[in-house]
Amino acid sequence: MPGGTRGGRAVVIGAGVAGLAAARVLADHFEAVTVLERDTLESGAAVRPGVPQGHHVHGLLALGAEVLEGCFPGLRAELEQAGAPVWDWGEGLCAVLPKGTPAPLPMGMPIQTFSRPLLERVLRGRVTALGSVTLRDGLAVTGLRTAAPGKATGVLVKGSDGEDEVVADLVVDASGRSSHLPQWLAGLGLPSPRITTVDAQIGYASRTYTYPAGQPRPSWMGLLEPLRAPDVRKGCYAIRIENNALHVTLHGGGGTQLPRDDEAFLAFAKTLRGPIADTIACLTPTSPVRRYARTLNRKTAYHRLPRWPEGLIALGDSVCTFNPAYGQGMTVAALEARLLEQMLRSRRDGTPFDGHGFQKRLARVTAFSWLMATVPDRAWKRPGPALPVKAGNCFLDRLIDTVPYDPRTYTTFSQLFHMTAGPLALADPRLLSRVLIGPRPSPNRPAATA
């Protein structure tokens, strides 16, 4: 339930996961919310031009699913009704790690897998069903509407009918990787924010498959074979999704050439240690091979600017993007929407929203995810990463190498990966001793084979 009286208008730039989650929160606190989307949206679940990564495997971490369920009650059931399976991470994942594959282990950690277009379609339906929300597509936002350099009062838009403006008391930039906010701030005479990038130059090639009639399903629901710098340069992530489909993304690092066609896709899969090649050899492709290489991590330090316009905030990929291989983007977007809800609830009636304070708190929300993505990605740097990065990757490698042989380590690592446990879990003396000792295969509990 909203805190205080609803009033005023908000505008959200972008109808992706971050924008839709923000719109849902804003609907409880503003009389009118307008979501502006550059793409022309279809009624079904289709990959749109503004989200080219939508062709590739997406993951919603356990914490992200929990937060989105709180924001959209019944979301998991609605997705399941649309065919998105729910499964336990420890039981359903086949993790082909450098030192082995952990045996199935019930963890009580429910995971739901689906395509990005399905999730967006369901979220759009939920948001547009709210009486206070209007979604306008086919509109490009060209700039901020301002009353003075220090106050945003809406946005300028351009569509097929020409130019227009949308007046708002709060502007939310959720336009993603293509955000023009730094240029808009510069146009207002404000300083440019510092932008940090970490690019491991990892590429993807993806396609979907369906199971022929009578074809048995694999024992796993998800298959993960991660990269590891500098030697493990090929990997994959495959998940079962809606419409009786298997979604497969092949990963390549360190200059690895990615496949472009059917024959090359299967040939690449055959070079992996896991069972993906044997699995897809019997399936029917339902999409062409699609490649993607915009996998850099990028952080824009809006929180460090000495001045920030009133009536403006930025969230999602507009502020911090992650290498999609780690599956953090949608979960972080959900956490940012939760932060927005918390700050709106605590705001006193009639006072402007503290946008600068929001950016500072958002930076803390993204800090751990940024480290989890960039520490392993910096390991691809040549001639070599800095000593602290080497030490961090050495610890992570030892941790992952212990996973196949130690159920407790596997559970803790899974909780860290899914953000249901924080970084303090790494300080557990029992975990540290296991990691420092290193992998110790037990004759009574060997690692499973892929």
Image (cartoon, helix red, strand yellow):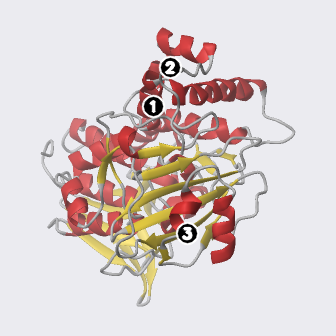
Furthest toward the front, the residue is 443
- Mark sitting on residue 281: 3
Label 2 to label 3, Cα distance in Å?
Answer: 40 Å
Give the distance between the C-alpha atoms of the residues marked 1 and 3, in whole angstroms: 34 Å
Crowding at mark 2 (Cα within 10 Å: few <14, some 14-19, many 20+): some
The residue positioned 49% from the left and 60% from the top of the image is 57
Q: Is residue 149 above or below residue 410?
A: below
Q: What kind of element bears circle 3?
A: loop
Few, some or many residues within 10 Å of mark 1 (<14, 14–19, 20+): some
What residue is drawn where x is 47% and y is 36%?
Answer: 417
Residue 65, percent from left and from top: 31, 47
Q: Amino acid at mark 1?
A: Leu
Q: Which residue is mark 1?
A: 416
Left or right: 105, with 52 as reference point: left
Left or right side of 234 for 247: left
Q: Is residue 261 visible?
A: no
**Which x, y percent locates residue 64?**
35, 45
Q: Amino acid at mark 3?
A: Ala
Residue 352 in percent (x, y) is at: 30, 45
The residue carrying pointer 3 sits among few (fewer than 14), some (14 to 19) or many (20 or more) residues within 10 Å by Cα, namely few
